[in-house]
Image (cartoon, helix red, strand yellow):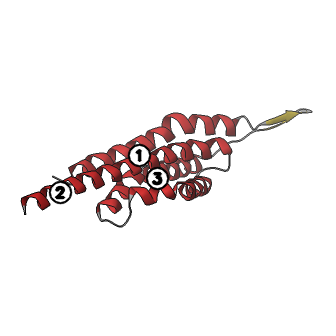
């Protein structure tokens, strides 16, 4: 019963990350890449990507976004284990944002728009993680108080 929310949230968040790649980021990346053609003086140079290159890019992006969108699930489980507190997460927000930007720069193509398309949702997911851990802490406090009152 306690892990049911995680069993629902993990695949749902993965699909959300994949959908962001497929419906928002890929059309932009493809438009940007295909608009890089050069023409002048009777010479035309245009990008002719191979299907294998396209599929490897799509696969890498879908997996990267899908796994990055697991942040609330992972952080909540760490919070449940008592390894991290919402207070510590809130204090470390600046460092988390820097880490998110670095991860976004590493796993996305080298253009700022696609990096922001990953970084902004990840920062929002980090904030959601803080709230999830806070809720778990409040529930734990209530159950501790109830067990103290019963004893």
**Circle 2/circle 1 CB separation < 8 Å:** no
Q: Is residue 133 left or right of residue 68?
A: left
Give the structural element (helix, strand or loop) at label 1.
helix
Residue 128: mark:
1
Local crowd size for mark 1, using a 10 Å CA cut-off: few (<14), some (14–19), many (≥20): some
Can you name the residue that lies furthest to the right here? 41
Which of the two discs, 3 and 2, labels the residue nearer the N terminus? 3
Q: Is residue 30 visible?
A: yes
Gap in Å between the C-alphas at discs 3 and 2?
A: 36 Å
Q: Is residue 129 left or right of residue 77?
A: right
Q: Position of residue 74 (x, y in %)?
A: 37, 58
Give the structural element (helix, strand or loop) at label 3.
helix
Which of the two discs, 3 and 1, labels the residue nearer the N terminus? 3
**Disc 3 versus disc 2: nearer the observer:** 2
- Image quadrant in which you'd find residue 80: bottom left
Q: Residue at x 13, y 61 (%)?
A: 148
Give the structural element (helix, strand or loop) at label 2.
helix
Gap in Å between the C-alphas at discs 2 and 1?
A: 26 Å
Q: Position of residue 83 (x, y in %)?
A: 36, 67
**Disc 3 versus disc 1: nearer the observer:** 1
Which of the two discs, 2 and 1, labels the residue nearer the N terminus? 1
Foreground pick, 142 / 35:
142
Q: Which residue is mark 2?
A: 145
**Disc 2 versus disc 1: nearer the observer:** 2
Q: Residue at x 68, y 40 (%)?
A: 33
Local crowd size for mark 2, using a 10 Å CA cut-off: few (<14), some (14–19), many (≥20): few
Q: Is residue 113 left or right of residue 85?
A: right
Q: Which residue is mark 3?
A: 68
């Amino acid at each position: 019963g306690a892990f049911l929310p995680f069993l629902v949230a993990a695949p749902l968040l993965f699909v959300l990350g994949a959908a962001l790649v497929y419906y928002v980021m890929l059309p932009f990346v493809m438009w940007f890449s295909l608009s890089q053609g050069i023409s002048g003086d009777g010479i035309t140079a245009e990008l002719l990507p191979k299907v294998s290159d396209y599929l490897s890019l799509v696969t890498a992006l879908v997996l990267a976004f899908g796994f990055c969108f697991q942040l609330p699930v992972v952080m909540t489980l760490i919070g449940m284990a008592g390894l991290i507190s919402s207070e510590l997460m809130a204090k470390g927000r600046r460092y988390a944002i820097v880490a998110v930007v670095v991860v976004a720069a590493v796993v996305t193509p080298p253009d700022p728009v696609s990096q922001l398309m990953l970084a902004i949702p990840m920062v929002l997911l980090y904030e959601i993680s803080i709230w999830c851990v806070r809720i778990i802490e409040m529930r734990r406090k209530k159950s501790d108080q109830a067990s103290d009152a019963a004893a």
